[in-house]
Amino acid sequence: MLLIGTCFLLAGTLLWSTRAAMSGRLGPNLLAGIRITSTLRDGSAWRAGHAAAWPIVRVAAATSVILGLVALILVLLRHPLPATAVAFLPVVVVLITVVPTVRRARLASEAAPPGD
């Protein structure tokens, strides 16, 4: 059940941090968000990078939630081994999406005009 909870926590964290950074509620920092040189340049680059990454993050988070629900259903149906396997898949999804997410963020933040 802990793994299943992690699926939902992962999805929520991805969605919240990306959306907050995209809107400016979460400014450039060294703890949360896409922290690469180009996004940390200034607020404009930070917001542009996260806005560009948002579509990929949204799909990764939705996939994590769906897989978490599937794992929960498998647990309730008393299939713990398949549930465990499915509960690990959100980590795989996030790892697969890291490169395209960061690439999109880098391109958008480098193209952003200097700002605040």
Image: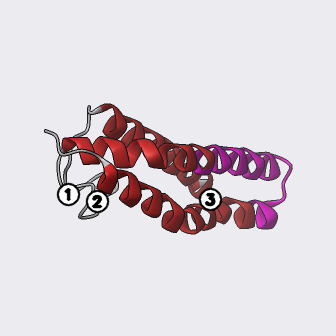
- Residue visible at 24% across and 41% down in the picture: 44
Q: Which residue is mark 2?
A: 35
Colour theme: secondary structure
Q: Please state which amino acid type lies under the numbered disc 2.
A: Arg
Q: Main secondary structure of the magenta part?
A: helix
What SS does tag 2 mark? loop
* Badge 3 or badge 1: first in the primary sequence: 1
Q: Which residue is mark 1?
A: 30
59 left or right of 53 in image: right
Residue 8: x %, y % from top left: 56, 45
Q: Nearer the viewer, residue 105 or 88?
A: 105
- Residue visible at 49% across and 58% down in the picture: 101
Circle 2 packing at 10 Å, graded few (<14), some (14-19), many (20+), is some
| Residue segment shown in magenta | 60-83
- Residue visible at 33% across and 31% down in the picture: 23
* Badge 2 or badge 3: first in the primary sequence: 2
Residue 89: x %, y % from top left: 67, 63
